[in-house]
């Protein structure tokens, strides 16, 4: 595998950055996870727009234009001879001194890894995922807006560990007010009385690219979509529940906190959205 670091391709074993990089020392950086389907980068422009938003929000001036970043992403896919895969695009503040101040970091690092991905086994898509609510909460949106996809994922990692310790693959995360925010790496949707509901970004949810695809599909299919505060009771009593994410795509949830959603089977609307999602990724995207 060839890894891109600031314009140079390295073999996987030789792809290294400094131990003084503030991305490592302080989690001072941002990232994107992008999907490649049939030689096309899915919603690449939207991912790069979010990266630029994250950079601006953390006062990290990107020394590359969107066209340059896009070209680097596509070149990394071509170099690795991928037609389907997952791209991790990372920008760190760069090498600096041991102090917190980013003033010593003159040279941001852009790292691009393009690889295969399979987040969940096939049976989770046909039989559904079971979740538990994690004790660790999503970070307060006033402290770090969830629109910023930063390298600080510690509370999500803790939630993932807490779920794993109880035999669950994935955790539901609440915000500091006790409303549902999202899962550790995916957005959450429910179906109630034929309408779709998902937490608003101000509840602590990342503005997911796949979430937006589902919102677009809902519009096309004529379903009403409501962004609102959701409690765990809303999820427990929902007719259907599913998660969305670049790596997970659209995945049904059949149980939360030991409570079965509807009859414990993936819902029909969820299947409809998963199908529509697959049809979209087959035809959309930026050719690499
Ligand atoms: N929430 C979090 C915390 C994430 O890290 C991600 C990305 N894995 C998502 C939601 C889903 O976002 P996207 O659809 O853009 O991948």
Image (cartoon, rainbow, N blue to C red):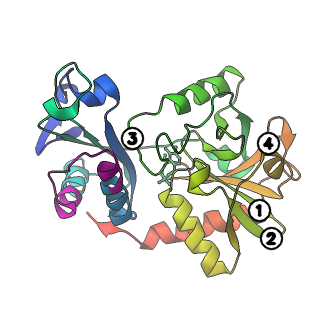
Q: Nearer the viewer, mark 2 or mark 4?
A: 2
Q: Are marks 2 and 3 in contact (CB under 8 Å)?
A: no
| Residue of label 2 | 194
Q: Does residue 193 sit above or below 72 in this rendering?
A: below
Q: Which residue sits at x=47%, y=47%?
A: 145
| Residue of label 1 | 191
The x and y percentages for residue 34 are 38, 53
Q: Find the distance from the CA under tag 1 to the CA under tag 3.
A: 30 Å
Q: Which residue sits at x=72%, y=40%?
A: 178
Q: Is residue 238 magenta?
A: no
Comes first in the chain, label 4 or label 3: 3
Q: Find the distance from the CA under tag 1 to the CA under tag 2.
A: 6 Å
Q: Secondary structure at mark 3?
A: loop
The x and y percentages for residue 95 are 16, 28
| Residue of label 3 | 150
Q: Are marks 4 and 3 in contact (CB under 8 Å)?
A: no
| Residue of label 4 | 255
């Amino acid at each position: 595998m060839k890894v891109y670091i600031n314009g140079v391709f390295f073999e996987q074993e030789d792809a290294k950055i400094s131990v003084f990089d503030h991305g490592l020392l302080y989690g001072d950086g941002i990232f994107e996870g992008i999907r490649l389907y049939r030689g096309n980068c899915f919603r690449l422009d939207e991912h790069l727009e979010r990266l630029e938003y994250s950079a601006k929000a953390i006062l990290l001036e990107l020394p590359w234009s969107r066209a340059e970043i896009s070209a680097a992403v596509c070149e990394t896919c071509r170099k690795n001879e991928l037609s389907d895969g997952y791209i991790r695009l990372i920008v760190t503040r760069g090498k600096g001194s041991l102090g917190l101040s980013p003033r010593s970091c003159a040279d941001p690092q852009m790292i691009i890894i393009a690889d295969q991905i399979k987040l969940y086994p096939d049976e989770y898509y046909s039989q559904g995922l079971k979740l538990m609510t994690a004790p660790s909460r999503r970070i307060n949106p006033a402290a770090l807006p969830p629109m910023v996809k930063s390298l600080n994922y510690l509370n999500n990692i803790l939630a993932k560990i807490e779920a794993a310790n109880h035999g669950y693959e994935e955790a539901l995360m609440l915000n500091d007010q006790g409303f549902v925010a999202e899962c550790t790496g995916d957005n959450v949707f429910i179906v109630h009385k034929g309408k779709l509901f998902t937490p608003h970004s101000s509840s602590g949810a990342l503005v997911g690219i796949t979430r937006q695809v589902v919102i677009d599909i809902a519009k096309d299919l004529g379903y009403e979509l409501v962004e609102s505060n959701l409690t765990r009771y809303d999820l427990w009593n929902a007719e259907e529940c599913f998660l969305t994410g670049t790596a997970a795509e659209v995945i049904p949830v059949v149980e939360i906190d030991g409570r079965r959603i509807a009859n414990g089977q993936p819902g029909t609307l969820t299947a409809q959205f998963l199908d529509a999602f697959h049809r979209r990724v087959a035809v959309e995207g930026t050719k690499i």
